Amino acid sequence: MPFRLEVVTAERSVFSDMVDSITVPGTEGELGVLPHHAPLLTGLTYGEVRIRRGSQETDLAVGGGFLEVRADKVVVLADMAERAEDIDIARAEEARKRAAERLELGANVADLIRAEAALRRAETRLRVARRRHGSGAPRMDGPSGG
C-alpha cells in the first residue's frame, strides 16, 4: 500500500506522489521507510534519496534538512534537493573542482566550512546524476572523498 511523499525545499516542491518506499541519508546512516513506518523525525545529511513506486525508481540529490514520517505521509524538508535528471554533470563537476580548490586555499575556519559544504553538495549531485545516466560513481578526490 503506497504512501504520500513530499520532498520540498524553501524554494520549491521537488517531488510529490504516492510511493512504495524511500531511502534517505540520515545523520545516523541510511534510513529506509516503507508503508506503516512508525512516526519519526530525523536529520538528513548530503546524499542520495532513492524513491520507489512499483518498478520505477526516482533518484534525488539532497543536502541537509529533515525527514518526518507521519501516519498520513512522509515529508522531506531539504536544504537542497534536485532530481537526477535535472543535474548538469559538467556544471556539477566544475563546481566540485572549484570547491576542492577553495578547500585547499581556505584561509580561515569559515572559508573551510563553506568550501567543505560546497564540495559535499557537488559530489552528491555528481553521484546521483552519474548513477542516473549510467556513467558510474564520481571520482572522490580530496578530504571528503573516499
Image (cartoon, rainbow, N blue to C red):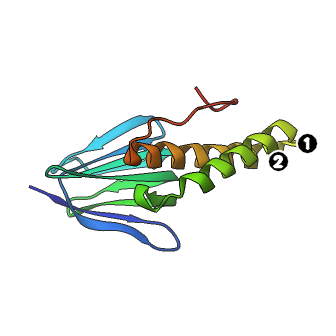
Residue drawn at 74 percent across, 40 percent down: 100
Q: What amino acid does circle 1 point to?
A: Ala
| Residue located beneath label 1 in the image | 107
Circles 2, 1 touching at the beta carbon (< 8 Å): yes
Q: Nearer the viewer, residue 8 or 134?
A: 134
From this viewpoint, which residue is outermost toward the right?
A: 107
User: Relative to 136, is 46 above or below?
Assistant: below
Q: What amino acid does circle 2 point to?
A: Asp
Query: What is the CA distance from the residue labelled 2 to the residue labelled 1?
Result: 6 Å
Residue 25 showing in the rendered view: yes
Residue drawn at 48 percent across, 67 percent down: 9
Q: Nearer the viewer, residue 101 or 25?
A: 101
Residue 61 location (% of width, % of height): 46, 52
From this viewpoint, which residue is outermost toward the left?
A: 1
| Residue located beneath label 2 in the image | 111
Residue drawn at 64 percent across, 32 percent down: 144
Residue drawn at 43 percent across, 42 percent down: 25
Q: Is residue 52 left or right of residue 96?
A: left
Q: Quadrant of the N terminus?
A: bottom left
